[in-house]
Amino acid sequence: MSRAIPPRRRKARLGQHELRDPFVLDRIAEFIHVRPGDRVIEIGPGGGALTRVLARSLGEAGRLTALEIDARLAAELREEFAAAPNVSILEADALKFDFSSLLGGGGERTGLSGTSPTMRPRLFCCVCLNRGRISRTSL
């Protein structure tokens, strides 16, 4: 899982950007209090920089599901994380996705992370609608 996907041309219509600063990535994981055994949903993993940090922080007992709208990036990430049974990469549009399918029942710690500014209003609505099932966010 240490293989870095090389920088590529971004698709502005999808709000893509490359977050690569290790300090910032670690701070995001700290901010949503990622602990081994938690469940985290990542919106728009892009090249997977934050995905790698979250997967490492969650350990084998945790569960990470990443939603990526770009088919090419989703395929590359599925290949990279193929050996990680606790990481799922879904090719999906988060604006149209039914998050209830990923959220567990009460008592399960679920974090939500999304770094794309274009996603913030939708993610905020998702948090409000599922406030009893999402325990922390980083938007």
Image (cartoon, rainbow, N blue to C red):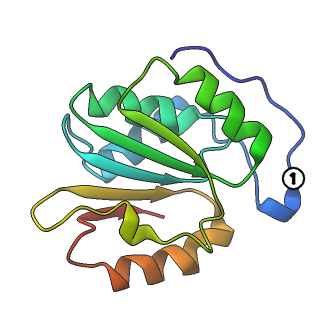
Q: Position of residue 63 (x, y in %)?
A: 31, 40
Which residue is drawn at the image coordinates 57% and 33% (left, top)? 49
Q: Which residue is mark 1?
A: 11
- Number of marks in the image? 1
Q: What amino acid does circle 1 point to?
A: Lys
Residue placed furthest toward the right:
9
Which residue is drawn at the image coordinates 51% and 17% (left, top)? 1
| In-front residue for pair 116/62 | 62
Q: How crowded is the residue under tag 1: few (<14 C-alpha within 10 Å), some, or many (20+)?
A: few
Decide if residue 62 is on the left or right side of residue 90: left
Which residue is drawn at the image coordinates 37% and 71% (left, top)? 100
Which residue is drawn at the image coordinates 61% and 14% (left, top)? 3
| In-front residue for pair 5/107 | 107
Q: Position of residue 70 (x, y in %)?
A: 76, 49
Q: Secondary structure at mark 1?
A: loop
Using the image, determine if residue 127 lies above or below residue 82: below
Tell me which corner region of the image, top left, top right, bottom left or bottom right, holds residue 110: bottom left
Using the image, determine if residue 103 lies above or below residue 132: above
Q: Position of residue 90 (x, y in %)?
A: 57, 47
Using the image, determine if residue 78 lies above or below residue 66: above
Tell me which corner region of the image, top left, top right, bottom left or bottom right, holds residue 128: bottom left
| In-front residue for pair 69/24 | 69
Decide if residue 65 is on the left or right side of residue 107: right
